[in-house]
Image: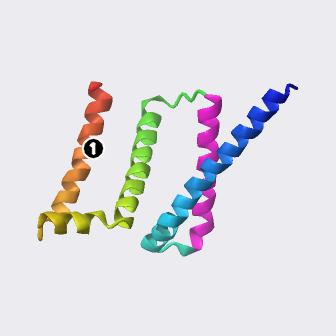
Amino acid sequence: MNIQNVIMAVSAFSCGFLVAGGVIALIVGLGIVTRLVGITHTAKENRWYESMIFTGAILGNMLTVYRIPLSLGRPGLLILGVSAGIYTGGWIMALAEMVHMFPIFSRRIGITTGISMIIWNLALGKILGSLLQFYMNW
């Protein structure tokens, strides 16, 4: 084996560990799993949550790195798209809640009522924008 290949493999492996560590630190720092367990009152299923996060990370990496083709059809694509959207939306909302974006924003622009309507409209706008992007190729 060429020493250059060994160095590249060790470097890639190390970078993968760094990125994975950063993602885990973000999950722990935001308290995603703890918050989800607290909201759903499923503390006894905490190991299941952790196992599913770990399994999803491994499968996602394998699908991305090895480019394994999946023929799920339209129903599978719909389920995957909705699941990925919920996952991404959950992360965005957890991060926004962590930095207290909504209270600071509403206080700065002087909104006292209707904050829930603003949040709903933001979510609906995100959904509409995504649909237009994916289905109309905008």
Quarter of the rendering containing residue 109? bottom left
Highlighted range, magenta: 44-67
The quarter of the picture where the C terminus appears is: top left
Q: Which residue is mark 1?
A: 127
Q: Is residue 108 above or below residue 129?
A: below
Q: Measured from the top left, where is residue 20 in percent x and y?
A: 62, 50
Q: Main secondary structure of the magenta part?
A: helix
- Camera sees residue 37: yes
Query: Which residue is rendered at x = 77% and y = 39% of the image?
Result: 10
Q: Amino acid at mark 1?
A: Ile
Q: Measured from the top left, where is residue 127 in percent x and y?
A: 27, 43
Q: Is residue 100 magenta?
A: no
Q: Secondary structure at mark 1?
A: helix
Q: Measured from the top left, where is residue 114 in percent x and y?
A: 13, 65
Q: Residues within 10 Å of mark 1 (few under 14, many from 20)?
A: few
Q: Is residue 14 left or right of residue 131?
A: right
Query: Which residue is rendered at x = 24% and y = 69% of the image?
Result: 103
